[in-house]
Image (tube, grey):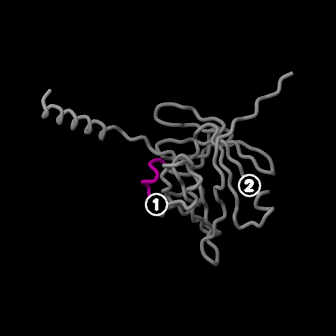
Amino acid sequence: MGRTGLLLGGAALLLVLACQPRQAAVYAPWEEGLTLAYENPTLPQPARSAGRLQVRVARSPVAPGGPAAIQLDLTSTQGRTSVNLLCRAGGVSLVAPDGQSQTRLLPEGFPAGDTWTERGITFRVVGRGAWQGARLLPPGTDPVGVWVEATPAHGPRHRTLYLPDLGEVESLEERAAGWTTVNLLVARGFTDLPSLMRP
């Protein structure tokens, strides 16, 4: 094959790759065993540590096209509970225990959509931003995420920064003095469930 043939072949390959549908980023934790810990920085110690919330991905099917149904185990000093997420086409929904009703956290196509309303709360994409806590991320991970503002009918506005493969990493609440961080990702790692002791 001559030089012209090689160039045409390379150009055709690039064109085919460019036309492949891109898999939408998942703006939620989805890797099994991934464990995230959150704290409210406005609380003094020891209340801050006592109020820490641990989120662990307990189950996430590995399938072409990305994760769909994800089970998260939430643990705090108040106890433990599980929640289920449905991730589809960039959107994230919280699935009720009955498995039927869903609460949309992020719409399909996110972050392309500008605004949406869910259960009386209006959400809008504020824009992209780099997370200041990027030291928790693996080397080479892009720390740029998407800020989303939530405006309820009553009460203060909130802004949440979502990163691909992690979801929420920081949440701010509008107060008299300005925007205050009220939820912050402070630890990230992988943990295995303890093996059951059998007689």
The residue type indicated by label 1 comes to Arg
The CA distance from mark 1 to mark 2 is: 27 Å
Residue 56, by quadrant, is top right
Residue 175, by quadrant, is bottom right
Residue 79 falls within the magenta-colored stretch? no
For the C terminus, the image quarter is: top right
Number of numbered callouts drawn: 2
Q: Residue at x 76, y 30 (%)?
A: 195
Residue 111 falls within the magenta-colored stretch? yes
Asked if residue 197 is positioned above or below residue 134 in the image, the reply reads above
For the N terminus, the image quarter is: top left
Q: Which residues are magenta?
A: 108-115
Residue 180, by quadrant, is bottom right
Q: Which residue is at the front of the view, 65 or 53? A: 53
Q: Secondary structure at mark 2?
A: loop
Q: Which residue is at the front of the view, 122 or 2? A: 2
List the single residue furthest toward the right. 199
Asked if residue 89 is positioned above or below residue 144 in the image, the reply reads above
Q: Residue at x 82, y 27 (%)?
A: 197
List the single residue furthest toward the top. 199
Q: Residues within 10 Å of mark 1 (few under 14, many from 20)?
A: some
Rendering coords of residue 151 (x, y %): 57, 65
Rendering coords of residue 184 (x, y %): 64, 59
Label of residue 52 in the image: 2
State the residue position of label 1: 128
